[in-house]
Image: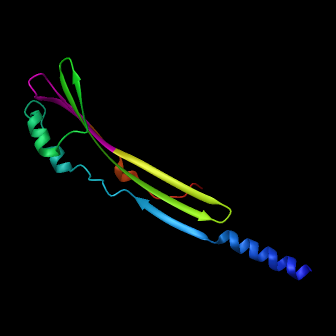
Amino acid sequence: MKRNFGLTLALLFLSTCLGCFAFGTNKEFQPFDAEQLATVEPGKTTAKDITDIFGAPTSIVEMSNGNAFIYQRSISKGTFIWLILLSFGNYDNQTDQVVFFFDNQDLLTHYGASLNADKASYGLPF
């Protein structure tokens, strides 16, 4: 009886270790090119120049003194472990965002960039 209990306990323990381990990432991420950002000059670059370099913006905000073109690109990475009795998961989403501000003549006045997508990582929640 003691031997059967020990065998049952060992099998139960081993069955909790069975499972699946998975990594995942989205495939749509295209980072902003630092060389392209370096060519942008406030006071000289136009809205047409920006769309020629970066393509269509993610969104356009109309303001009283001009427009803002917002470009967002994000990357997501996930790690999951499925066990018989227990599951763990981690999902990390990081975004690159560049915003260009134009006056009423579509001339660039200034821009800002937040480039964090390279910080997305795989990991476990513990």
Q: What residue is rendered at 22% in x and 24% in y? A: 62
The answer to whether residue 126 is above or below residue 44 is: below
Q: What residue is rendered at 10% in x and 43% in y? A: 52
Judged left or right of residue 7, residue 64 is: left
Image coordinates of residue 6 in percent, x first then y, are 84, 78
Residue 101 located within the stretch drawn in magenta: yes
Which quarter shows the C terminus? bottom right
Mainly helix, strand or loop, the magenta region? strand
**Outermost residue, top direction?**
64
Which quarter shows the N terminus? bottom right
**Outermost residue, bottom direction?**
3
Q: What residue is rendered at 9% in x and 36% in y? A: 48
Residues rendered magenta in the picture: 96-112
Residue 115 in view = no
Image coordinates of residue 46 in percent, x first then y, are 9, 33
Q: What residue is rendered at 81% in x and 80% in y? A: 7
